Amino acid sequence: MKKLFLDDIRTVEMVYDHSIISEFVEVRTYEEFVLYIQENGLPPFISFDNDLGLAKDGTVAKDGYAAAKWLVYESDLDLRNLKFNVHSANPVAAEQIRGLLNNYINYLNSE
């Protein structure tokens, strides 16, 4: 299974070494993120951006933090072994994503 890259603007090669870009699937929106995981299962690695631009109706789109919250609260997936990175340029949001996922994974692994 491929790794997942969530970002509305950047491409994988803008963040990761060119030798591994073929290991990723790029998704551009929260909706594509959710649909990809529902159809393919939990990938072995997810790279998160936070700010995902505007939705089709011109409102602010659901962001990477919303995607992380979907994983934790709605997906019913076992996240114990989830590996992830946050490549967002938004430091506050990046820490929110890392904090949510790390705390939840630590909780699962302590049971």
Image: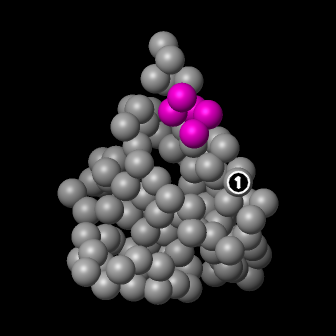
- Up-down: is 105 above or below 96? above
Give amino acid for label 1.
Answer: Glu
Q: Residue at x 31, y 51 (%)?
A: 44
| Residue wearing tag 1 | 95
| Residue 94 included in the magenta stretch of the image | no
How packed mark 1 is, by other alpha carbons closer than 10 Å (few <14, some 14-19, many 20 or more), is some
Name the chief secondary structure element in magenta. helix
- 103 inside magenta stretch: yes
Percent position (x, y) of residue 23?
25, 70
- Residue 38 at what x, y percent from top left? 36, 50
Q: Quadrant of residue 74?
A: top right
Camera-side residue: 13 or 40? 13
**Start and end of the magenta stretch?**
102-106
Direction from residue 52 to residue 40 in the image, left or right:
left
Secondary structure category for the residue under label 1: helix
What is the image's colouring? one colour
Which residue is at 49% across, 69% downward?
6
Q: Residue at x 71, y 51 (%)?
A: 96
> Residue at 39% across / 85% down in the picture?
13
Mark yes or no: residue 102 visible: yes
* 17 relative to 75 in the view: left or right: left
* Closer-to-camera residue (18/57): 18
